[in-house]
Image (cartoon, helix red, strand yellow):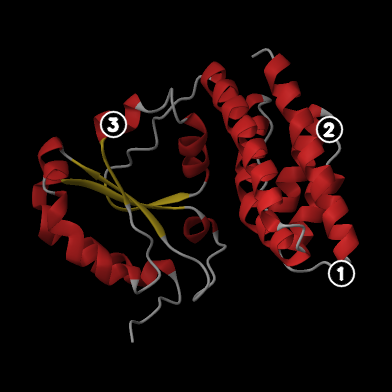
Amino acid sequence: MAKIPKTPEEIFPEITADFQKIFGEDLVSIILYGSGAGGDYVPGKSDLNFLITLTDRGIEGLDRALETVGRWRKRSVAIPLFMTRAYLTGSLDAYPVEFLNMKRHYKVVSGEDVLAGLAFDPCHIRLQLERELRGKLLHLRSGYLATGGSPRKIRELIRVSLTAFVSLFSALLYLKSVEIPNGKRDVITAAGAAFGFDTAVFLKCEEIRSKTDRFSSAEVQAIFRDYMKKVGRLCGMIDKMEV
């Protein structure tokens, strides 16, 4: 059985050696990001997320990493994001929220710190926030209908959707130049305070996500209806926002 790392750091030398062997001088950097870099890694439950930056020549030989990536997946390492430096910098206008959240918690495992100098245009962030919120609202509506009203399935829909909203709230705080807290509940609360929206339903959804709630089936259904309503209001708020 593949050994699950107790800490992210214990696999740094091995994973670095593996990808250096494959790509050699075409390996620009390996960066750990997300919960593993932010102190929230839970062995056996959390995946470890890596950004691997390659040269143009290296990215053309991505097939050489197939076996290695498959082997590391058995040890709770998610499929890494492979990109070139040009792809990274060229994506900041299209996907600023993803890179903003990546930059919040990361550790350089090997090579250059390709995230250090990234800057984000508030207009690009606002535009992506609106696009993401509107898309997620449609997903919540269709997902709700797909549950058939089953409280168990509604709980699961809340669980898989809320983390994405927390990432969007972090981006909202960035637009207000507010320091972004670490915990999900703290991010939700801070975003509500900064933008003046009611966070009660999002905090209830966080209880459901973390399995710390005692809501009845009827309450879960009511919470989800309010969840959709509040996301709809957020869409309108972001649409009118000036940055």
Q: Does residue 120 appear in this view?
A: yes
- The residue wearing badge 1 is 214
- The residue wearing badge 3 is 87
**Regarding mark 1 in the picture, which secondary structure is present there?**
loop
Mark 2 or mark 3, which has the lower sequence index? Answer: 3
- Disc 1 crowd rating (10 Å Cα; few below 14, some 14-19, many 20+) is few
**Regarding mark 2 in the picture, which secondary structure is present there?**
loop
**Regarding mark 3 in the picture, which secondary structure is present there?**
helix
Residue beneath the point at 82% across and 46% down: 225
Residue beneath the point at 65% across and 49% down: 143
| Disc 1 + disc 3, Cβ < 8 Å | no
Residue beneath the point at 63% across and 50% down: 161
Q: Does residue 209 appear in this view?
A: no
- The residue wearing badge 2 is 197
Instruction: Give the Cα separation between the discs numbered 1 and 2.
Output: 25 Å
Q: Position of residue 192 (x, y in %)?
A: 80, 36
- Disc 2 crowd rating (10 Å Cα; few below 14, some 14-19, many 20+) is some
Instruction: Give the Cα separation between the discs numbered 1 and 3.
Output: 46 Å
Mark 1 or mark 3, which has the lower sequence index? Answer: 3
Q: What is the number of the mark on residue 16?
A: none
- Disc 3 crowd rating (10 Å Cα; few below 14, some 14-19, many 20+) is few
Instruction: Give the Cα separation between the discs numbered 2 and 3.
Output: 36 Å
Which quarter of the rendered picture does the N terminus lie within? bottom left
Residue 9 as seen in the image, left or right of residue 101: left
